[in-house]
Image: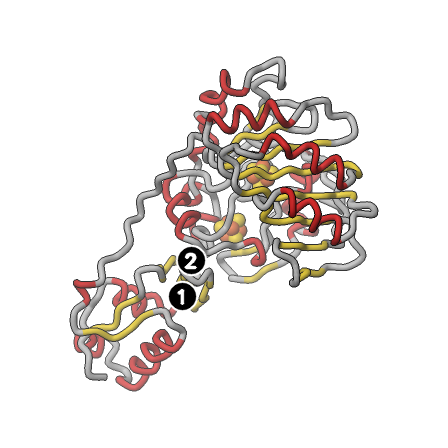
Amino acid sequence: MTEDYFVFFASCMPVYGRNGITICDTQYGEIHWFPHDLQPLIESIDKRIPIIEMKKKFSDSDDGLEQFLDHFSNKKLGFYTKNPNVFPKLSMDWYHPSKVTNAIIDFDTCSTHKIEHIIDALDHLLCPHIQIRYFQQVNKESIIDQLISVKGSSVNSIDIVLTHPGNLSIDDLKTIYASYSQINSFTLFNAEDDRIVDDVPFLLSYMKREITNEKSCGLITENHFSSNIKLFTESIDFNNCLNRKVSIDRTGAIKNCPSMETSYGTVPTTNLLDVIDLVLNNPVTKIKKTEIQECDSCEYRMVCTDCRAYVDNPADIYSKPLKCGYNPVTTEWADWSTNTLKEKAIKFYQLDNSN
Ligand code: SF4
Ligand code: SF4
């Protein structure tokens, strides 16, 4: 060890939980978990304490310190240097030029709202990302027709969720994609098995889960974590699901999220642009992970998308997401749906096995 300092890469940021620590690599999207015992060492590195000082502080074994630093280095979390000051930390400011950054638009067999009116409004708001969820069987031609309004709009990323994919083949999905290269992903539920298809130019996931409506949203698992600088910084000051989000539910109601009760009117009777400030200024959009019970002491809080529609205590908007089975005290995962402490809330939201 000839260098004076060990420094974490700017994109690798420690998050301290009650009994675990994550180092979130926001460049490569990886999450490295460490036990709570390592907090003094990780904090010292993060504060850029010279190695010689750390040796005094953790005097039990120089070899032990070297092994840990080498481990962090091998994992590409940091590096040795003589000049830490030439490696500034990343700004934690979150900025996005769009008034709305993401929207959910739901449809089922009874829906009468037209996507073109909604896309027109979203274009005014410079919205770059939409998720369209079809809770009914829909064919290739309908999807292609429906998406015409997206062409030339601000929308440059589309996720499509199909709960009843019927006979839609991979070739059909490729045909849809050929018309709309903005499509980022297709997720098909009620499939025969869970699988991800690799050899297509979009993300294609088949899921066995049987879902029929918006109540299936809000699930939190390790697979849902996302380590990126946008989510990390947005999570500091805002609710990382609802910030700058607008939704149109299956009935055409304008909401923060399709699973929430509050409606700001129904399209097209209500112009989305007339109510958008009310949607975006709902206080729920400002609830941060550090204000939420249990999440405030969870090491995954900066990579975990929140849910405010389904919470452990429906009377307390600051309670933990209902569909999370992680316990930051034991650092163990369990099935949330069989947790007896959650029974009351599951009943309140009328969730069943498919949700
Ligand atoms: S608040 Fe929950 S239910 Fe609503 S969009 Fe977010 S994760 Fe889904
Ligand atoms: S919902 Fe809260 S407790 Fe569960 S993993 Fe996310 S941050 Fe941790």
Contact between marks 2 and 1 (CB within 8 A): the answer is: yes
x then y, percent, for residue 196:
67, 60
Q: Quadrant of residue 223?
A: bottom right
Where's the N terminus, which quadrant? bottom left
* Residue 311 can be seen in this image: no
The residue that appears at 68% across and 37% down in the rendered structure is 214
Residue 213 falls left or right of residue 331? right
| Residue marked by disc 2 | 18
Q: Quadrant of residue 182?
A: top right
Badge 2 crowding class, 10 Å Cα cut-off, few under 14, some 14 to 19, many 20 or more, is some
The local secondary structure at tag 2 comes to loop
Asked which colour scheme the image uses, the reply is secondary structure
Residue type indicated by callout 2: Arg
Numbered disc total: 2
The residue that appears at 78% across and 38% down in the rendered structure is 138
The residue that appears at 70% across and 37% down in the rendered structure is 144
x then y, percent, for residue 307:
55, 41
| Residue marked by disc 1 | 36
Q: Earlier in the sequence, mark 2 or mark 1?
A: 2
